[in-house]
Amino acid sequence: MTTENEFLNTAVKAARLAGNIILDNIGKISKEDVGLKQASDFVTRVDMDSEMTIINTIKKRFPDHFILAEESIKETETDAFRWIIDPLDGTTNYIHGYPVFSVSIALQYRKEIILGVIFDPLKNELFSAEKGKGAFLNGHPINVSAVSTLQSSLITTGFPFRKKEFIDDYLKLFKNIFNKASDLRRAGSAALDLAYTACGRCEAFFEIGLSPWDVAAGSIIIKEAGGIVTDFGGGKDYFLTGNIVAGNPAVHEKILREVQRVFRKIIDK
């Protein structure tokens, strides 16, 4: 009989093993190790090695579970257990030696995310959450920020490199928020942006055109930390659309309002 702790323990073990691979290869990436999936979207041998390690760790314990992984296995959506894996979120950063990247692992059951783990191997910070059990950083409970005004908020985002046709609208939104918020950051790892929002290091995060593995783990960690996650229309289809607004309740509402002023008639109507 499987216990919920076994799910979390397996995810944590897989994330840490993948983190070891990532750390062991810092500064060792050559041109031959890098492939291009599409414009500005790279994959390295470290992504592949990390992903295979995660999958093998999960499959050893749960051989009947389904897998949705960024670089390899994309099994159809199912009501059964399905693991959603980003083996190296922030690959471009990693290639350049820019120290912002992470491992993201989530578990879905009956099409709902029930567990999430995000691991930053450089800082040895492991964010985790299980449905109904709260969110944690290295085992200590975390909560979203209590900041309620946009003027006092640090907002994180990502440029829409997969949706470059929206860059003009995005830059309009960026400018609108920039003029009202304390400041904005674009670090290059959506998973870490979500984790940092969950633990109160920033107040909200928004981005266009993400994939399920970018947001799966972070979405449950934010929710369990007391935050809100929606698509640009304010609904729950961020997995489908790839467009996400996440934050503490007060600032999420304000960011969503700004998003909808620009994108209401364009996406997530």
Image: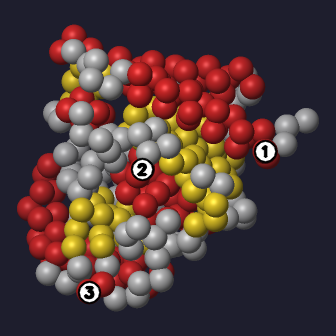
2 or 1: tag closer to the N-terminus: 1
Residue beneath the point at 51% across and 48% down = 125
Q: Residues within 10 Å of mark 2 (few under 14, many from 20)?
A: many
Q: Is 64 displayed left or right of 204 in the figure? A: right
Q: Quadrant of residue 178?
A: bottom left
User: In the picture shown, does residue 75 fall above or below 53?
Assistant: below
What's the CA distance linking mark 3 and mark 1? 41 Å
Residue at position x 31%, y 21% from top?
44
Residue 157 appears in view: yes
The Cα atoms of the two marked residues, 3 and 2, are separated by 24 Å
Q: Report which residue position mark 2 lands on.
A: 191
SS at mark 2? helix
Q: What whole-number distance in Å separates the C-alpha atoms at marks 2 and 1? A: 22 Å
Residue that sits furthest to the right in the current view: 1
Which quadrant is the N terminus positioned in? top right
SS for callout 1: helix
Where does residue 58 sit, x and y in percent of width and height? 66, 27
Front residue of 263/26: it is 26
Q: Quadrant of the C terminus?
A: bottom left
Mark 3 sits on what residue? 151
Callout 3 secondary element: helix
Residue shown at the point (12%, 73%) measured from the top left: 175
Q: Position of residue 132 (x, y in %)?
A: 72, 64
The answer to whether 204 appears left or right of 69 in the picture is left
Amino acid type at image mark 1: Asn
Mark seen at residue 5:
1
